[in-house]
Image (tube, rainbow, N blue to C red):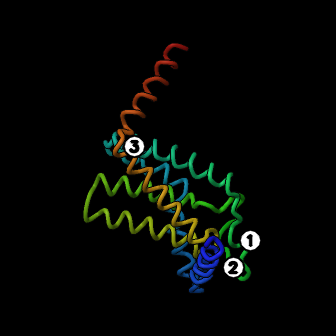
Amino acid sequence: MKEKLKKVDRELYVAINNRYDSRIIKLVMLIITFLGGVTVSIAMPFALYFMGNKELFLKMTLGLIVITVIVQSIKIIYKRTRPYEKVEGSVRIGCKLKTYSFPSGHTSTSFMLMTLLAINFGMPIAILFLSTAVLIGVSRIYLGVHYPVDVIVGAFLGTIVAISINIFGGVYIWENVLNQILKVVQLSI
């Protein structure tokens, strides 16, 4: 079963990776992948905060911390090599990455953020948010830095973290943490 899954994963990767050799598509994929990167992921909660949505800011900030710890821990445990280093004929577009492949951090982060946005803003804009997350995942395969399973697991993890934070009062927990930090800072002054 494991070997069959690896084979399907590899075949899907080859089918998507740089499938359409076009400068325009490469540029679009780089832009899409940027949307799932650190800069946008950190800017998004702050933009919501400055627009007056403190609750969503707190949920997203907590989500970013949780998903980063989960994804980086799994990467260290599994140590999956990037596909461009392993699959013959792979095309890598963009910079060479030094971290492991499984699971996709861009995809997990984008699904966590977009799921929180979808839950809080509802339909029909939820379709736009979740479609963006899917495109970010596909861009990671196209650019040669992830296998499909990396992206699927990343999407699953991001969605689960977002739903958990939304259901189990992430804001309440996070506000308590912030209050404790503020008390410590005030005591030390």
The numbered mark, 1 or 2, whose residue comes first in the sequence reads 1
Nearest the viewer among 52 and 18 is 18
Circle on res. 90: 2
Q: Residue at x 51, y 18 (%)?
A: 184
Helix, strand or loop at label 3? It is: helix
* C-alpha span from label 1 to label 3: 36 Å
The amino acid pointed to by label 1 is Glu
Gap in angstroms between the C-alphas marked 2 and 3: 38 Å
Label pair 1/2, CB-CB below 8 angstroms: yes
Instruction: Classify mark 3: residues with Cα within 10 Å, few (<14), some (14-19) or many (20+).
Output: many
Within 10 Å of the Cα at label 2, are there few (<14), some (14-19), or many (20+) other Cα atoms? some
Secondary structure under badge 1? helix
User: Is 129 placed left or right of 92 in the picture?
Assistant: left
Q: Is residue 62 above or below residue 86?
A: above
Q: Residue at the left extreme?
A: 123
Residue plotted at (40% across, 58% down) = 114
Mark 3 = which residue? 59
Going from the N terminus, do you reach mark 2 or mark 3 first? 3
81 to 68, vertically: above or below: below
Q: Answer with left or right where residue 48 lies relative to residue 102.
A: left
Label 1 Cα crowd, 10 Å radius (few <14 / some 14-19 / many 20+): some
Outermost front residue: 1
- Camera-side residue: 97 or 13? 13
Q: Position of residue 151 (x, y in %)?
A: 54, 66
Q: How many marks?
A: 3
Q: Label 1 belongs to which residue? A: 85
Q: Name the amino acid type tagged 2.
A: Ser
Residue 8 vs residue 177: left or right? right
Identify which residue, 69 or 74, lies in the foreground.
74
Element marked by disc 2: loop
Give how far across and how far down residue 65 sits, in percent.
52, 43
Q: Amino acid at mark 3?
A: Lys
